[in-house]
Image: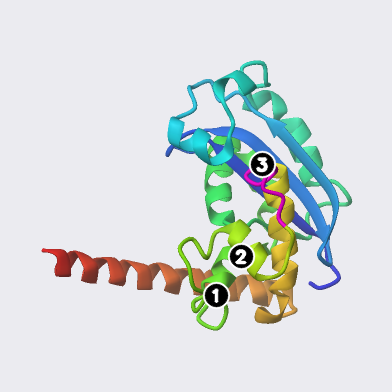
Amino acid sequence: WYNMTLTCVDVETIDKRGRICQLGVAKVFKGEVIQTWQRLVNPGFPIRDEARLIHGISDEMVKDAPRLIDIIPEFMSELTAGGGIDILCGYNLNYDITHLNFQLGNFFRDPIRNVPKFVPLVIVGMGNVGSGWAGKGRHKQTNVARHLGLPVDESKAHGAGYDAALAGRIMWHLREYVPSDPWVANNLLIKTKIKQDLDFDAWLRRKEAKDR
């Protein structure tokens, strides 16, 4: 996959239900960002304060933005630009896919169905990668980028287009930790994610037992 283009996606949401207020797409080739796209979306509901404090998007900013249903054609055109999707990537791609599948349905689901999927956050959680990094929030995207020596523009961080591009750049810098065959890498990341979730659940149960 080292000679394949990463199609990177990111969503910003307004609440725990994952209602989308911004979409971002980036095309990244060998760590170089070759295309970015970002659009605000009117979610039709007030943006919760805790979400606004993360991404900085306010009700005022989205009041005249298109609804999600109206922006689907443009989003899908950007997603499949350049001959389609070689590999789908997102820093926390499982989160993005969950909400895009739910809110866009087959418009999104069909083009990504038979595409390898890369999740840098899963790689960072591997024992031989970021588990030994120190500091609170060490696995957050911007902190990972800094750890890898990548420049971060704080004024643009948490913008969906910027975060999508940053995910692709991070993935390229983590390439040594996954196989070069895209489907072998995809399957490794699926198995690793399952193990990470099981390990986290076990840790949570031990913590709850200890706190009783």
- Looking at the image, which residue is at 45% across and 31% down? 49
Does residue 121 appear to the left or right of 64 in the view shown? left
Answer few, some or many: residues within 10 Å of disc 1's Cα (few below 14, many 20 plus, some between 14 and 19). Answer: some
Compared to residue 32, the image places residue 49 above or below, namely: above
- Looking at the image, which residue is at 68% across and 52% down? 112
Which span of residues is magenta-colored? 152-159
Three-letter residue code for mark 1: Gly
The answer for how far apart the CA atoms under marks 1 and 2 are is: 8 Å
The answer for how far apart the CA atoms under marks 3 and 1 are is: 24 Å
Three-letter residue code for mark 3: Gly
Q: Report which residue position mark 1 lands on.
A: 130
Earlier sequence position, callout 3 versus callout 1 = 1
Three-letter residue code for mark 2: Val
195 is within the stretch colored magenta: no
Q: Count the labels in the image.
A: 3
| Residue at disc 2, secondary structure | helix
Q: Report which residue position mark 3 lands on.
A: 159
Answer few, some or many: residues within 10 Å of disc 2's Cα (few below 14, many 20 plus, some between 14 and 19). Answer: many
Q: Report which residue position mark 2 lands on.
A: 144
Q: How far across and down, in percent of the image, does residue 14 sit?
A: 50, 33
